[in-house]
Structures are given as C-alpha cells and as structure tokens.
Image (spheres, grey):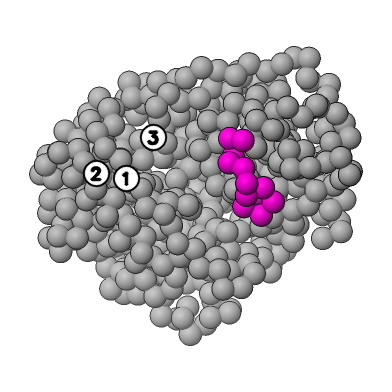
Amino acid sequence: MPLLGIDIGTQSVKAALFSEDGKVLASATRASRHYKPAPGIVEEDPEFQLLSVCETIRECLANSGVKSSDIAGLGIDGQMAGVIGIGQDGKAITPYDSWLDTRCAPYITRMQEAAGADILRTTGNPPSLNHGPKKLWWKHERPEIFEKIAKFVQPGGYVAMRLCGLAADDAFIDSTYLHFSGFADNVKLCWDESLCEQFGVPSGKLPRIVEPHAVIGNVTAEMSAACGLASGTPMIAGCGDSAASFLSCGATREGICVDIAGTASVFAATVGGFCTDPEHVLGCGRSATPGLWHPYAYINGGGQNLEWFREQFASQHTLDELNALAAAVERRQDLPMFIPHLGGRVSPGWPSLRGSWAGLQWDHGAPELYLAAIEAVALEYAIYQQTLSNLLPDFDSTEIRVTGGGEKSTLWNQIKANVLQTRITGIAGGEGAPMGVALLAGFGLGIFDSLPTSADRWIELADSVIPDKNSKNYYDERKARYCDLLEALHDWA
C-alpha cells in the first residue's frame, strides 16, 4: 500500500507518494511564504503551511492515479527550531516564529548565563536560536499573547494536528525535536520541571512527548474534503526535517555521517548513545531510528547564501554558471574568505556574529566571491568534524552522505571532500525528507519491521567524490585562517 511523506521546509512544502518498495509515484511542491517586516523578523503563516500541504497531497493523488482509499498512511516532517503558539482549539494564535528569526537573541544569553550547563546536560543542546529562547521572547515581549497560548508546537506537528482535528490537549512534540526545546530531559523523554520553573515557563504549555513513529490520529472528514485523503487515514507523529533527511540517507547505523546541503547546511554523525559537547559546537538529537542519536551542527542559511549572492551580485548568472566560473579559479592562499553566518552563528551560539568577506583584492570578482561562499561551508564543517573527533575519539567514519539541493554541485562536493579528507556520496534519485518520513510512516503502521532494513531497500547510493590528498596542506592552511577570522570577528561583533 502506498505511503505519503510530506516535508514542510523553509523554502517549500513538498509531498511525495511512494509505493511499498520505495518507488516514487508522484511528487508536488509549493513555495513557502516568508514575512520579513523588519530586520531579524522571519515569520510564516501556519494556515498557509496547512493549505500548501493540502494542495500538494491533492496533486500527488491526481498525478499518481492512486485512490485515496489505498493510501496506507502518512507522516509529516518540518522545520525544527521554530515555534507556533496554539489556542485550546488547536489553531494557531501566533505566526510561525521561524528558526531564521533572530529576535530571541537576548534570551539565548539569559538562558546560557542562568542555566547553560543544565540545559546542555538535559537537552543535549546549548541555548541557541531555538525553542527555549523563543518561548521566553513570547513570554516577556508579548505577555498578553503568551497567556493565551495553550501549547507550543512545530509546523509538522501543527499541520498533523489540524488534519486530524486535534485540540491543544492532544498537542504533541516528537522526540527528534527535544534537543531544541530548552526544557526537556532528552534521555528520560520528559519535561524538566526545574528548568521550566526557573524560567517561568509553565510545563502545561508544553505538549506531550511521543515517538516519531507513533500514530497520533486519523484524517477527519472535514480535512478529507480539503486534502483529498480518505477520512480515517492514519497519521504518524513524524519528525524534524533534519531527522527525516538523515533517514532518507540511510543513516540508520552507527558511523554514517550526513551532509544536508539545503537552506541550512547541516553536518551530522550517527552514534549509539547520548553525548554532550562542552564546547557548544555540536548538539545531540535523537534519531528517528530507535536507539540511535545524531551529534550535529549547522550553519543558519548556509545554502541560502548561494542564492542570496546570485540575486544580489550576479543575477545575470545561474547557480550552475557560477559553479563553472568558480571551478576555473586558480586555488591560491590570497583568495578571499567568507563568513557564512549572515543570520548569526548557531553552532556554537554566537547570535551577534554576521557574515563578511575578508582579504578582498581588485582582481577578485564574482567567481572568487562565490567560491569563498561555498568553501566557507566546508571550512565550517571542518570545525564540526574536529569537534566530533575530540568528543568521540573512537568514532570512525569513512563516508559522508549528502542530500538536499546542493548535492547536485560537483564543485561543492569536491571542496567538501578535499577539506574534510573524506569520501562524499550522493543519493541516487532520492526524494530527501519526504522519503524519510514516508519510511517512518511504514514503520509506525507495522508495514515495515525494521527501519534500517527498509531504508536499505529504498535507498540507492550514487557515485562518490574522492578527496584529493594533494589538496590537504592547502586546505589545512585555509582552515587555520578561517578559524582565526571567526575569532576576530566574534570579538568585534
């Protein structure tokens, strides 16, 4: 029986319908709408996210020819670090406060100074541009709205609730989000009452915690008319978009690393136990695969920077053309360097840091500046890789699997392979996060007995990019200069 996976991403909503053996039967997308009324504010309308999900489901059903009654079930993943406040009826009373929104930055400092060590120890992640500081922003900056908020949820959970007609009492958060929560005991799968009390966040405003493969409801007759699915179609809790992407890369066993080359640039490993990083570079989140964890770090908008550069400085070129121009640039140490943190650094939490180029010369043009932008992601990943090695000296990975729009860039993959001195492997014909959450739905509905086994059946690896050993010294020097520049700009910011 077909399975439906839906990803509520930063740039678009995407739905994909899969046969039981992993064949893509149909897919559909709708562009996201961001509301940016002032610097630092990035919001979305939760009801537009719901509408987009309904439209993509309808399109998948129409294009596949599959009867709605034949759909076994569905799951929804979504953006992870933002929040939506809902009322008692389960409907949004705040916009989606995006992970790209930086208004909560002062509360990152407040949480870190008051209880940073405790938050890291219990959640697996230091305070950053995520749920904890955002909840405090609503509490202190919009107290009249905060009082009306019955629960805080995320986009994937919100749309699942609306499709299943759930009110606030049945609101949920799945375990893959807990490292971003600010107030959860991630190991014990519960809310930490002492942290809630310390920051004045009533635990009653926090939703129940569920496993990502748990069935949370069924599509209602009202929403059946809106989206085209049969009334009663079962819905699993789903997971965060990064967790779904890890699953779609087959990161279901220890040792597999993943590069999500999307709007955010995410680097993650797969390990067998919970771990915390005292350097505040790596967070540690639960895997969608039971029993596994993902130490990870990411650049807020790392992939988004490329389209920003093209639009602002090289609109006469496509990204493919810019890649070709950058590939032809001679590699020299006097090339410019780029800091990719236009929205603040997340890993670790340096919210005041902003992007910049350094070392510009008159012979530097669009190809050199663009090359610096893509190289910066790889250099930042090198910091993550070294932190992982320091934290887990016995961890050994010989491969990084890449997914997301950036996986198509041969140049970017080669630079990452050279900087990290690790093989980069793509996914052949992969559908990314929708595939991951569809696999999860099959597991939760009992169609699949094992996520690792099912992932192996569904996922086909593409060709690998092999690191150039002769480039190691060049990039080691670039890494050292990049780290020096980061520290200097952090002190300046």
Q: Is residue 108 visible?
A: yes
The image quarter in which residue 107 lies: bottom right
Q: Main secondary structure of the magenta part?
A: helix
Query: Residue 340: within the magenta?
Result: no
Q: Name the element at disc 1.
A: strand
Query: Disc 3 designates what residue?
Result: 431
Q: Earlier in the sequence, mark 2 or mark 1?
A: 1
Taking the image as shown, residue 172 lies to the left or right of residue 315, namely left
- Which of the labelled discs sits on residue 136, or is there none? none
- In this rendered view, identify the residue nearer to me: 324 or 182: 324
- Which of the labelled discs sits on residue 60, or is there none? 2
What is the three-letter code of the residue carrying label 2?
Cys
Work out how far the residue at label 1 is from the one at label 3, CA to CA, in angstroms. 11 Å
Crowd tier of the residue under label 3, counting other residues whose Cα lies within 10 Å: few below 14, some 14–19, many 20 or above: many
Q: Name the element at disc 2.
A: helix
Identify the residue shown where x is 15% and y is 64%: 222
Q: Looking at this rendering, what residue extends furthest in the bottom direction?
A: 144
Q: Looking at this rendering, what residue extends furthest in the front direction?
A: 316
What is the three-letter code of the residue carrying label 1?
Ala
Q: Are marks 1 and 3 in contact (CB under 8 Å)?
A: no
Query: Residue 311: within the magenta?
Result: yes
- Which of the labelled discs sits on residue 28, or is there none? 1
Residue 224: x and y in percent read 15, 57
Identify the residue shown where x is 58% and y is 63%: 101
Residue segment shown in magenta: 308-321
Work out how far the residue at label 2 is from the one at label 1, CA to CA, in angstroms. 6 Å
